């Protein structure tokens, strides 16, 4: 397990505002209490209303601003996690297509629905983002030049009520990990509001 630098997470969240938004697309599903898909959505993030942008940015950021290394922990992929048909392979494909493949998204929802059964309806919210990581000079002052583009997914799993109104995220992840201000494809950051991300990681991987 690698220690997550909280500053790395905060750096990402600074690009998750209405004015400085790194998300290109948001997709998701509403799951019933038995883990079956009850409805889906998939849209360009900029097409959302201002109120919906604010609401969904709050959901995405909740995963990253949680208690680092307690609620949000690094998980290293094992050799078995790289096998064909693995969850990691599915996430790699969704990252590559930038959430534009509904068949892959349905596979993700069904995969989670088979394993995560809290006993009540919930929503799965998936965000795709690209972050141009600014280069830092030797004096630690940020430069305009981009050092690399961090291409990532955030998943937030929230209880839902009424007309699919999302509550505070309870589970989720950031894929791939963002370590030392760079893409770390050997891991992912797993979130659990109860402080046991290892259990959720074992459940979905």
Image (tube, helix red, strand yellow):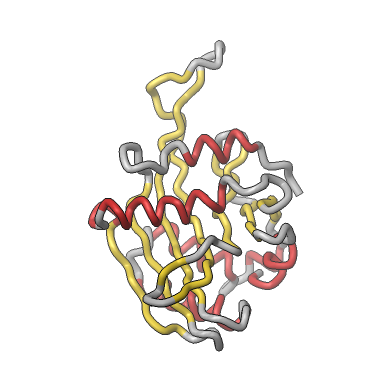
Which image quadrant is residue 181 in?
top right
Which image quadrant is residue 68 in?
top right
In the rendered image of this protein, does residue 38 appear above or below residue 109?
A: below
Residue 159: percent from left, percent from top = 53, 71
Residue 193: percent from left, percent from top = 65, 59
Which image quadrant is residue 127 in?
bottom left
Please tell me how many numbered marks the rendered image carries. Answer: 0
In-image side of 170 versus 42 (left or right) = right
In-image side of 44 versus 106 (left or right) = left
In the rendered image of this protein, does residue 159 appear above or below residue 147?
A: below
- Residue at image point 44% right, 58% down: 95
- Residue at image point 51% right, 80% down: 121
Residue 9: percent from left, percent from top = 57, 40
- Residue at image point 40% right, 45% down: 130
- Residue at image point 66% right, 69% down: 205
Q: Nearer the viewer, residue 46 or 168?
A: 168
Residue 81: percent from left, percent from top = 66, 66
């Amino acid at each position: 397990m690698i220690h997550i630098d909280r500053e790395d997470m905060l750096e990402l969240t600074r690009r998750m505002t209405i004015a400085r938004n790194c998300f290109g697309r948001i997709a998701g599903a509403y799951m019933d209490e038995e883990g079956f898909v009850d409805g889906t959505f998939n849209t360009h993030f900029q097409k959302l209303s201002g109120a919906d942008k604010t609401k969904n940015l709050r959901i995405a950021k909740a995963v990253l601003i949680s208690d680092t290394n307690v609620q949000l922990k690094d998980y290293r992929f094992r050799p078995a996690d790289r096998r064909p048909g693995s969850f990691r392979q599915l996430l790699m494909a969704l990252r590559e297509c930038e959430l534009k493949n509904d068949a892959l998204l349905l596979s993700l929802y069904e995969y989670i629905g088979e394993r995560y059964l809290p006993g009540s309806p919930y929503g799965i919210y998936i965000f795709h983002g690209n972050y141009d990581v600014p280069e830092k000079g030797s004096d630690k002052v940020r430069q305009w030049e981009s050092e690399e583009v961090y291409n990532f997914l955030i998943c937030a799993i929230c209880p839902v009520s009424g007309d699919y109104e999302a509550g505070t995220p309870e589970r989720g992840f950031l894929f791939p990990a963002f370590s030392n201000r760079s893409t770390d494809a050997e891991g992912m950051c797993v979130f659990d509001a109860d402080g046991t991300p290892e259990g959720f990681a074992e459940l979905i991987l």
